[in-house]
Amino acid sequence: MLLDRLYKNFPRNAGFFSEALRLERELEGLTYAPASAAALTLICPRRALCEARELELEAFARALRDRVKYAVLLKIADQKHVDLLTKRALRGDERSLRSLLNIGRGITAEDLARILPELREEFEKARRASAKVFVTAARGLVREAAVYVKYAEPHPFAGMGHLYQSHVFYAVAGLGEDYVYLFRIDKGADTRRLALAEGDVAPSAFRRRKIKVHIYSPGVGIRSYQEEAADPTPRYRALIGGECRPDRHCLSCRYKEPCECAAKGNA
């Protein structure tokens, strides 16, 4: 699918997705944020809001790619027609872009249940391909991707948004029978609580009751955590409010520049 190829080379095609997001805002009035940004409110709502704004385009691009892809797998849309609309939209045809934006918009978690075998096979293909990558030799995002597919449980992985007011909080997770599954690489003391908080968004989107998180520590192994899902609404409200919460994290915050807390010398 052409749209899938555009998403996989997101940096090169950011202009196309930016125009699609502009039209999405005009038509639906929606703002997109990754589930990870909602989790970041545990550290600081202002930092979470800044990250959500920075990552909105990528979160939207993933959401658009996913819903169109699922529509094709569900046979709601024909792949050749989708590719034709995408080609026309790339050439600046706004009518085609409008049509593309509406494909798969109403897909539900119950609809996804019908294509879970195909989504699981995708992950299995990635796992087989990862056998060619030496994790210790890889670097950066390549290493993270290799670790993910080598060590994560083989679930069907999917993305879906949870709508709150005019915000779509987009979660990507593995889907178990009654739980969502997240796999994360250990990046410090906050990894566990941020992963579990991010996991709270996914059950709301996918209609699951529990969260299962695996945290991989290189050279140590995998730690496993499982909890009942909590209501993510307070984190949504905190992100939208964007209030600064000064603490030790201010010293390493990437968003000192636009934060009035830093301007007052608190950071």
Image: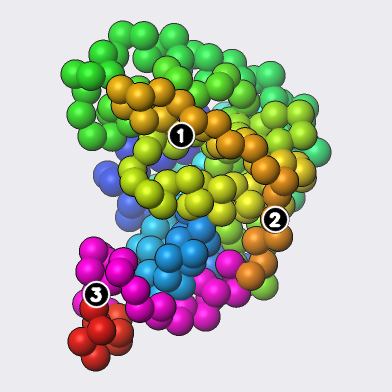
Residue identifier under label 1 = 215
Q: Name the quarter where the C terminus is drawn.
A: bottom left
Question: Would residue 251 be visible to someone looking at this image?
Answer: yes
- Where residue 205 appears, x then y in whole percent? 69, 49
Residue 48, image quadrant: bottom left
Magenta-drawn segment: 235-258
Q: Amino acid at mark 3?
A: Lys
- Cα separation between marks 1 and 2: 20 Å
- Cα separation between marks 2 and 3: 30 Å
**In the foreground, 64 or 23:** 64
- Cα separation between marks 3 and 1: 29 Å
Q: Secondary structure at mark 3?
A: loop
Residue identifier under label 2 = 230
- Where residue 63 appears, x then y in whole percent? 54, 48
Q: Is residue 258 left or right of residue 206?
A: left
Of the two numbered discs 2 and 3 on the same chain, state the one appearing first in sequence: 2
